[in-house]
Amino acid sequence: MTLRARIVISVLLVAAIAGLVLSFSLFKEDTSTPTVHDTAITSFEPPTGSHVLRQGLIAYQLDPIYTGVLFVDGMEIPPEELEPTALTNQIGYAPAKDKVTGVLKPGKHTATAEFWLRSKSRDSSRSFSWSFFVT
């Protein structure tokens, strides 16, 4: 191998390593917890940006004067697939292979709570979304 070839290979190798280091240093995972400005939602899980198991509970809790539905990755969860929970007015779902979403694949997922006053129709609904990662 000639001296010129060694120099070119060395420069390319250094550039590749520098590119790798730069790409890892620029990556920033969003782990901020969203502020829920709507008092109708009292809690939600999993926390925004958290890493959870693919069968973990996805849920939100509402003030008792509200009702709602849950979406996972844009798919509305049918009422018969919602999980009974110990908390009052909590809407929860545990993904599984025999359910509408199937087992969640590793990666980023988004849950959306759509809710409305029990005394009104769904046409007056509001929504809140949060994201988490399945490992």
Image: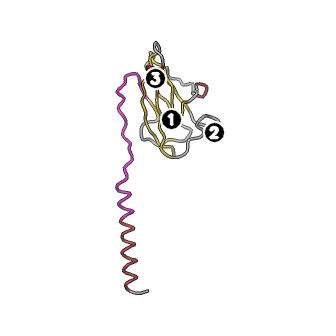
Disc 3 or disc 1, which is closer to the eye? 1
Task: Determine the CA span between mark 1 and mark 2.
Answer: 18 Å
Report if the CB atoms under discs 2 and 3 are less than 8 Å apart.
no
- Residue 12 horizontal/vertical position (percent): 38, 73
> Regarding mark 2 in the picture, which secondary structure is present there?
loop
Q: Residue at x 56, y 38 (%)?
A: 55
Which residues make up the magenta segment?
19-43
Q: Residues within 10 Å of mark 2 (few under 14, many from 20)?
A: few
> Regarding mark 3 in the picture, which secondary structure is present there?
strand
The label shown at residue 74 is 1
Q: Amino acid at mark 2?
A: Lys
Task: Determine the CA span between mark 2 and mark 3.
Answer: 27 Å
Query: Which residue ends up furthest to the right in the rendered image?
Result: 98
Q: Quadrant of the N terminus?
A: bottom left
- Which badge, 1 or 2, is on the more N-terminal residue? 1
> Circle 2 is placed at which residue position?
97
Location of residue 65 by image quarter: top left
Q: Amino acid at mark 3?
A: Phe
Q: Is residue 111 left or right of residue 3?
A: right
Q: Amino acid at mark 1?
A: Gly
- Which badge, 3 or 1, is on the more N-terminal residue? 1
- Residue 53 horizontal/vertical position (percent): 53, 42
> Regarding mark 1 in the picture, which secondary structure is present there?
loop
Query: Which residue ends up furthest to the bottom in the rendered image?
Result: 2
> Circle 3 is placed at which residue position?
115
Disc 1 or disc 2, which is closer to the eye? 1
Report if the CB atoms under discs 3 and 1 are less than 8 Å apart.
no
- Which badge, 2 or 3, is on the more N-terminal residue? 2
